[in-house]
Image (cartoon, rainbow, N blue to C red):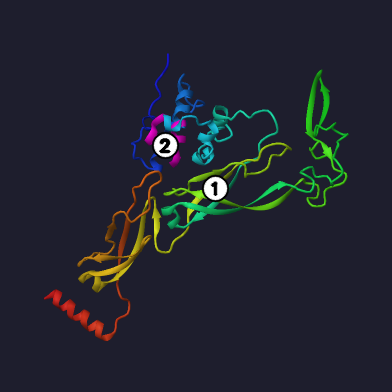
Amino acid sequence: MTTQQRDYYEVLGVARDADERAIKDAFRQLALRYHPDRNKEPDAEERFKEIAEAYAVLSDPKKRADYDTGGFAGVAGFSPEDLFSHLNFEDLFDGFDLGGFGGGGLFDRFFRRHRPAGPPRGADMEVVLEVPLERVVTGGDETVRVRRPQPCDTCQGSGAKPGTTPRSCDACDGTGQRVTSRRNQGVTFQQITTCPSCQGRGHIIEAPCADCNGRGEVLREETLAVSIPVGVEEGMTLRIPGHGMPSPESGGTAGDLHVIVRSKRDARFERHGRDLWRVEAVSVVDAVLGTEVEAPTLEGPTQVSIPPGTQPDTVLRLRGKGLPGFGHDRRGDFYLRVRVQVPEHLSSAERDLYERLRALSQA
């Protein structure tokens, strides 16, 4: 009997406009409830997988936008690595004693990527890229600089001086491991350790390459162009394939570079999602009588009316003057919080006027 795939929002029990915090809290609560090591119901494991898949899609702004517009077809074809690579489950469950529930435990058993035969893939790398708010509006290329090991051009990654080749380690027959055996009460025990002669490499370099000192790799700085999408979300991760750490073995593919996008600090505003906030100080007189102030926006300065009688912490909104959303054209808003600035030091003339004003108000 086949079962119909349930809507991801229904799976987590959240509204379609739920924010990131609500989605994360719902996932944590349900995942703890249906953890198969805690819940022994027959369907707990399948429910747990369903919950994890829903969270993997809805917690990624790009995948969520694709799902919102195209349904399941919009996120079809993703491998487990594609779905879960942007998540750190150990951080999600920080503070909970779950005994193997983190990234190295249950999730590995459920969602482990089956690596094809051949040399292992290199590890992924992460780098943080700060972009100005104007780039969030326009999108476009930004550059990121990364230092990472790369194969030595002189020895082609062998570590040996050109014209020579490494020789197989005689102590371990090229395995990189030493195996020792002992018998105890008729039972044979084997202990496998790293070969001390070759430090586990399986070969010995008698004439090291002068440029890499026999390591077979050198550190180089790369300058890469990263395409920033319009409306990029705070903390969104962009993947650059093949620019991570090299494979630990010759012939293996490099890992990926994950670029985490952050908004560059801007003295004019604070970013809250698609909205921009600014504090504007006005004098007591201007708050009482009203005035016009010039406020900066991403499109340039604009005049904002402060109405008479404005109270401290009054918030004025300029619609559509915030940031664009990711995957759609709707702009956020610009919020101006008014701070009434009370003078700390008065001249004699100012004090006289305030005294006369107080007398009037008490009359």
Residue denoted by label 2: 66
Q: Residue furthest left?
A: 363
Mark 2 lies on a secondary structure that is helix
Outermost residue, top side: 1
Residue drawn at 26 percent across, 69 percent down: 292
Answer with the quarter of the image where residue 58 lies.
top left
Rendered-image quadrant of the C terminus: bottom left
Q: Residue at x 54, y 50 (%)?
A: 226
- The residue under label 2 is which amino acid type? Asp
Q: Position of residue 271 (x, y in %)?
A: 40, 55
The residue where tag 1 is placed is: 259
Q: 5 or 132, which is in the foreground? A: 132
Q: Specify the quadrant that holds the N terminus.
A: top left
Residue 196 visible in the snapshot = no
Please determine whether, in this image, residue 238 is positioned above or below residue 57. Answer: below
Q: Quick check: marks 2 and 1 in contact, CB under 8 Å?
A: no
Q: Amino acid at mark 1?
A: Val
Residue at point 83%, 44% (across, down): 160
Q: Secondary structure at mark 1?
A: strand
Residue 94 in percent (x, y) is at 51, 41
Q: Please report the bounds of the magenta region as a residue range.
A: 53-72
From the viewer's perspective, is residue 162 above or below residue 278?
above
